[in-house]
Image (tube, grey):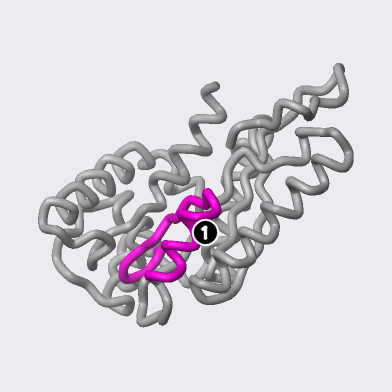
Amino acid sequence: MARHENLRRRGPTRKVLPRILIVCEGTKTEPGYFEDLRQLYRRVVELELSPGGVPKTLVTRAAEMKKDAERAAKAAKDENLLYDEVWCVFDIDDHPGVGDAKQQARENGINLAISNPCFELWVLLHFQDQRANINRTNLRALCRRYLPGYKKDLPVDKLSPHHDQATARARSLDAWQHEQGREHANPSTGVYRLTQSIRGFDEA
């Protein structure tokens, strides 16, 4: 997000880390994955995770936290308190109000990383393409082929070497679904946009 002109950075001696707020639907897999990314990029990005909830609830919470940060930054005259980016991560599933959540996100400058059917599609794309419609159960079974013993904890050290391939596959899948007029259809995932953004801060 654009920094406010009437605010200033404090502290001349320490490099200020970019701040990304990530509000997740899941309470274990997604927060654990992004926390591991935070550790991986700890010198360049600060992540704040707020897990749990349905899409509309997540976006509402993210909008409130973003506004709270803006008020705190204005009161302290310190732009370090602002979020550089705000993201919500959730699955399509059978959640009600997904359309309302998207609209609210647009109105509040919040980015969305949506997966269909679930976050594990992003995991699978580290190892193979997936164009056919797939359910959550079969998707997790495929993930266990590549990550034996996988349940909810993701070994980021085993995923990171394949990140570029996963991003290319996810982007190609996104474009293919868009060409068919099926945005966010099964299978698709926008998690690659968030991870690319995190890596972009690292490269800046």
Mark 1: which amino acid? Answer: Cys
Residue picked out by circle 1: 88
Residue 115 painted magenta: yes
- Which quadrant would residue 130 be assigned to in this image? bottom left
Residue 63 image position (x, y, % from top left):
62, 59
Quarter of the image that includes the C terminus: top right
Is residue 3 toward the left or the right of residue 120 in the image?
right
- In the image, 64 versus 121, the foreground residue is 64
Residue 34 position (above or below residue 90): above
Residue 122 image position (x, y, % from top left):
36, 56
Residue 155 image position (x, y, % from top left):
50, 54
| Residue 51 in sight in this render | yes
Is residue 125 toward the left or the right of residue 41 in the image?
left
Q: At x 40% / y 72%, what residue is drawn?
A: 98
- Which quadrant would residue 40 be assigned to in this image? top right
Q: At x 58% / y 43%, what residue is drawn?
A: 85
Judged from the image, the secondary structure of the residue bearing numbered disc 1 is strand
Q: At x 44% / y 38%, what residue is drawn?
A: 196
- Specify start and end residues of the magenta stretch as a single range: 99-119
- In the image, 95 versus 120, the foreground residue is 95
| Residue 149 in sight in this render | no
Is residue 106 toward the left or the right of residue 126 in the image?
right
Residue 102 image position (x, y, % from top left):
42, 62
Outermost left residue: 180
Outermost top residue: 12
Residue 69 painted magenta: no
Residue 195 position (above or below residue 150): above
Q: At x 23% / y 65%, what residue is drawn?
A: 185
Q: How many marks?
A: 1
